[in-house]
Image (cartoon, rainbow, N blue to C red):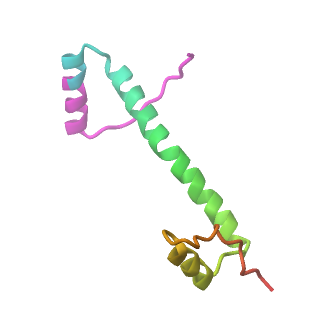
Amino acid sequence: MPSTPFSIRLPDELKQSLATISQLTHRSQSQIVAKAIAEYINRNEWKLKAIQSAKVEAESGIFVSQDTTLNWLDSWGTDDEKDAPEPDVAPK
């Protein structure tokens, strides 16, 4: 995979820890940092996209009311468990 140079500033203590890990694992500091960034992005990108999507949805003003949600939740685990409710609140 092609790569692009990227420069960052690290606190001295973190830079020293990176150097230690690099020596212990026989991997370059660049490899370690690239892997750490990739793992961070994989762990967080979906969450940030979901939050952004929820903001857009919330701005539409279309919601499921609290009472409807609570009635649905109360049905969980009963013989009359209800399907997820449809939105019942919309802007006027």
In the image, residue 45 sits, relative to residue 36, either above or below, namely below
Corner quadrant of residue 69:
bottom right
Residue sitting nearer the eye, 40 or 61: 61
Corner quadrant of residue 85:
bottom right
Q: Is residue 12 left or right of residue 45?
A: left
Bounds of the magenta span? 1-20
Q: Farthest residue in the top direction?
A: 26
Q: Farthest residue in the right direction?
A: 92
**Quadrant (top left, top right, bottom left, bottom right) of the N terminus:** top right
Residue sitting nearer the eye, 2 or 65: 65
Q: Is residue 3 left or right of residue 8?
A: right
Residue at 62 percent of width and 63 percent of height = 54
Q: Is residue 14 left or right of residue 44?
A: left
**Quadrant (top left, top right, bottom left, bottom right) of the C terminus:** bottom right
Q: Please tell me how many numbered marks the rendered image carries.
A: 0
Residue sitting nearer the eye, 7 or 92: 92
Residue sitting nearer the eye, 30 or 90: 90
The x and y percentages for residue 89 are 72, 81
In the image, residue 2 sits, relative to residue 45, either above or below, namely above
Q: Is residue 16 magenta?
A: yes
In the image, residue 81 sits, relative to residue 71, either above or below, namely above
Q: Is residue 76 magenta?
A: no
The x and y percentages for residue 46 are 55, 46
Q: Is residue 71 left or right of residue 35?
A: right
The x and y percentages for residue 9 are 35, 37
Residue at 59 percent of width and 51 percent of height = 49
The x and y percentages for residue 77 are 48, 68
